[in-house]
Image (cartoon, grey):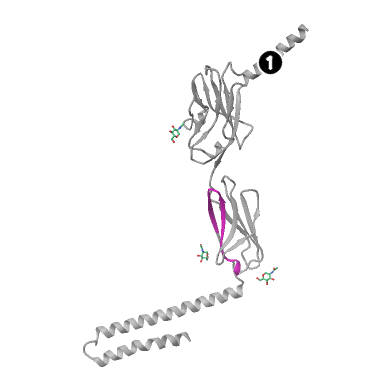
């Protein structure tokens, strides 16, 4: 009987101690926090205790998304003093200490993204520190994507357009479009999350034009371009050359005519404008005559 009584007392004690240990409670208020890179953010951590804050001890740690297995200390409150990690000096501070364990993080960077833990201890009240967790996500607009092309740009060849973007949170979506001379959306092959390519086979002069890659997320869109000129087959290229030469020679003829007309007008005005009306008329006729000359040169 005495043994079972002692057993009951012991159980009571354990329960009481456990209840006492639970006295300090942590409430993170939010489990997921988002901030745009460069802005400040408040990481919430409230705690409730019934005892005097005689030896309050708070530790914030952070495990970056890039290396979740190597958490670092962010800021510590101990013996009435706050000490921040040297890598965060001037960017992190407690806000409302000692009644709250919230911290403010200024000038946020993408590398600040990770899993944060807030640990609060107020001995002798708690044996185990209370602990809360939240995830901080630092959003960033897409960086300028890089456009490239490779392949054979002779008629019948095949060309690959590729585009890659270095950063952006959330992960940017990549699209390829032809924007000139007509606007067409192109099917894309993703190569990992951050780069995508377009394969164009059997290229022809219709393939020539301006191609645009877009990288976009909720914070914005960035573009890069490829200007593709497909070399035509030799026959048609000599045709183009002929056309160019013809246009060029016709322009020269027109220019010569224009000079001639201006010269005639000039001589007409300076020379016999006032003295002889008949001469004047002749000059005028000459000017009127030129359009038919021009017409003839076109035929
Ligand atoms: C963070 O920026 C605010 C102003 O936006 C400033 O009042 C505060 O002191 C800064 N905190 C730190 C730790 O630099
Ligand atoms: C390539 O395109 C041309 C027209 O642009 C077509 O006549 C030809 O058959 C195509 N060749 C192949 C292999 O698809
Ligand atoms: C693309 O190239 C063509 C010919 O090389 C040129 O006429 C055109 O202006 C270029 N377009 C752009 C947007 O660079």
Residue 281 position in % (x across, y down):
29, 91
Q: Is residue 168 above or below residue 90?
A: below
Residue 260 shown left or right of residue 10 in the figure: left
Residue 44 makes an appearance in the image = yes
Magenta region includes residue 207 = yes
For this orientation, the residue located farthest to the right is: 1
At a point 62% along the width and 19% down the height, the residue shown is: 21
Q: Magenta residues: mostly which secondary structure? A: strand
* Towards the viewer: 126 or 278: 126
Residue 19 position in % (x across, y down):
64, 19
Q: Secondary structure at mark 1?
A: helix
Magenta region includes residue 240 = no
> Magenta segment, which residues?
205-225
Q: Quadrant of ligand 1?
A: top left
Residue 192 position in % (x across, y down):
65, 48
* Towards the viewer: 215 or 44: 44
At a point 60% along the width and 69% down the height, the residue shown is: 206
For this orientation, the residue located farthest to the top is: 2
Residue at label 1? 14
Residue 50 image-quadrant placement: top right
Mark 1 crowd level (few <14, some 14–19, many ≥20, 10 Å Cα): few
Image quarter hosting the N terminus: top right
Residue 142 makes an appearance in the image = no
Q: Is residue 281 above or below residue 131?
A: below
At a point 53% along the width and 55% down the height, the residue shown is: 223
Residue 256 position in % (x across, y down):
39, 81
For this orientation, the residue located farthest to the left is: 275
């Amino acid at each position: 009987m005495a043994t079972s009584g002692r057993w009951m007392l012991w159980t009571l004690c354990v329960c009481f101690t456990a209840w006492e240990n639970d006295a300090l409670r942590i409430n993170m208020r939010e489990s997921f926090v988002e901030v745009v890179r460069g802005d400040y953010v408040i990481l919430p951590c409230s705690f409730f205790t019934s005892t005097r804050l005689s030896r309050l001890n708070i530790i914030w740690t952070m495990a970056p998304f890039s290396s979740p297995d190597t958490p670092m200390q962010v800021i510590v409150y101990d013996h009435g003093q706050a000490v921040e990690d040297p890598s965060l000096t001037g960017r992190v501070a407690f806000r409302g200490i000692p009644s709250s364990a919230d911290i403010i993080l200024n000038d946020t960077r993408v590398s600040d993204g990770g899993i944060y833990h807030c640990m609060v201890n107020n001995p002798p009240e708690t044996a185990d520190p209370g602990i809360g967790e939240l995830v901080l996500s630092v959003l960033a607009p897409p960086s300028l994507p890089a456009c490239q092309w490779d392949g054979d740009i002779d008629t019948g060849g095949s060309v690959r357009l590729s585009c890659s973007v270095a950063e952006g949170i959330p992960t940017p979506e990549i699209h390829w479009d032809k924007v000139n001379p007509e606007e067409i959306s192109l099917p894309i092959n993703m190569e990992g999350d951050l780069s995508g390519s377009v394969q164009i086979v059997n290229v022809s002069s219709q393939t020539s034009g301006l191609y645009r890659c877009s990288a976009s997320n909720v914070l914005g869109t960035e573009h890069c371009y490829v200007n593709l000129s497909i070399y035509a087959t030799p026959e048609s290229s000599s045709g183009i050359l002929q056309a160019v030469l013809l246009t060029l020679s016709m322009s020269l003829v027109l220019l010569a005519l224009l000079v001639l007309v201006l010269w005639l007008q000039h001589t007409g005005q300076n020379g016999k404008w006032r003295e002889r009306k008949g001469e004047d008329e002749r000059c005028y006729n000459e000017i009127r005559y030129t359009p038919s000359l021009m017409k003839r040169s076109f035929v």
